[in-house]
Image (cartoon, rainbow, N blue to C red):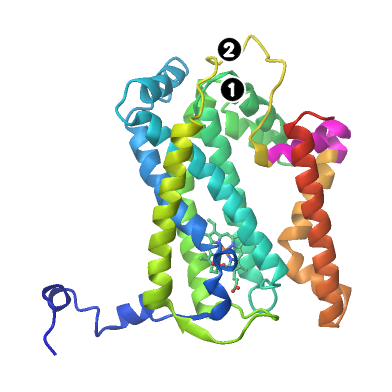
Amino acid sequence: MKKSWISERIPVESGKIKEALFGEKIPNHMKNWLLAMGTTPFILFPLQIITGMLLAFYFVPSTEMAFESVRHITEDIRYGFWMRGVHHWGANLMVISLFLHMMRVFFTHSYRKPRELNWIIGFVLLFLTLTISFTGYSLTYNQVSFWAATVGTNLVKEMPLIGGFLLEMLRGGEGVTANTLTRFYTLHVWVLPIVITLIIGVHILMMRMHGISEPEGFKKGHYDFYPGHFYKIIVVSLFLISVLSLFSVVLPPGLGEPANPAITPLHIKPEWYFFPVFLLLRLVPLKLGMAITGLSVILMIFWPFVEPMFSKKIKTRTTIANTIGMIAIVIMIAFTILETFSII
Ligand code: HEM
């Protein structure tokens, strides 16, 4: 058979590389995108890196210039508002898709043996994604972002044993100052992107080594990753770019007022995905709120090892997991709505 120009020069056709990249057999349930949701953050993350790099060409990480450089990007640079809008909405969509991915893994019980460690690696990815969002939010250096950084880092102090040290490390001193901005910038533009890229690599490698789980209740059978699923990923990527572009035009992120450390605004709010914790900390004493949050997070991280303690019967375990999962989701949604509309 005559080989094409490209396959003569890059002979992946015959090699093991093609098998490794495209030879995967995928369970039938992955035809439903909601059940293949992990690919969404996988697509969005490189997009964040590209738009972030373009923003970094213009952003100046100094307390005097940060806000002004964001204004310059938004108002003066050609397509700057688009770059910023896609980066802003991409971060939000990344968090939403991560929650959906976690929910699908949880309710299909795919964290069970032998995938317990990949669940924990996933949790590390969630934590790092929330941290990269938090540090990015603070870079705009407007009133809301400055005070969100102040309140957010204050909470770190409440952590037992290492709280004080961690606060000092994060802020580079007592208060939120130029040092804090430099540290957040360093974390946001290179430390966290590199670490997240490496950990996504480990997560995908683990997933490929185990093969994707085949949950109960779905039609058994497999299909080839290439070409069907591969083309679907391309189409979804184009769809995501279109949605993000639309959002950046219709709902562009605002600029707000430049940060003023001397004036505390009346309403300080973090990003929406911290609302449940934010509301809880407003409702109960700080130490109790931190303890409830910390214990819930630890419970979820080690859930694959906690669940078997409830019962030997898989059916009972499934019922318990589903009930706890549903209660957690209802509480999270209710708290987010209450905080969004400032009902309490
Ligand atoms: C940047 C973050 C993440 C990326 C890019 C990512 C990507 C993926 C992809 C592409 C898969 C293949 C199956 C699917 O698409 O659903 C997968 C599977 C998996 N993920 Fe993630 N994931 C991330 C975060 C998480 C989080 C936060 C968790 C849970 C705490 C998690 C737990 C798992 C587990 C246990 C599997 C195996 C599921 C199975 O075999 O059915 N991942 N991930």
User: Which label's residue is closer to the chain start, 2 or 1?
Assistant: 1
- Are discs 2 and 1 less than 8 Å apart at CB? yes
Q: Which residues are magenta?
A: 274-288
In front of the other: 278 or 293: 278
* Dominant SS in magenta: helix
Q: Amino acid at mark 2?
A: Asn
* Label 2: element kind: loop
Residue 151 is situated, as x and y percent measured from the top left of the image, at 69, 27
Q: Which mark is residue 146?
A: 1
Residue 239 is situated, as x and y percent measured from the top left of the image, at 43, 53
Residue 97 is situated, as x and y percent measured from the top left of the image, at 58, 54
Q: Amino acid at mark 1?
A: Phe
Looking at the rendered image, the quarter that the C terminus falls into is: top right
Q: Residue drawn 61% across and 22% down?
A: 144
Q: Which mark is residue 315?
A: none
Residue 311 is situated, as x and y percent measured from the top left of the image, at 88, 78
Looking at the rendered image, the quarter that the N terminus falls into is: bottom left
- Look at the image and tell me whether residue 109 can be seen: yes
Q: Which mark is residue 260?
A: 2
Location of ligand 1 given as a quarter of the image:
bottom right
In front of the other: 74 or 61: 74
Depicted 333 relative to depicted 237: above or below: above
In which quadrant of the rendered view does residue 226 lie? bottom left
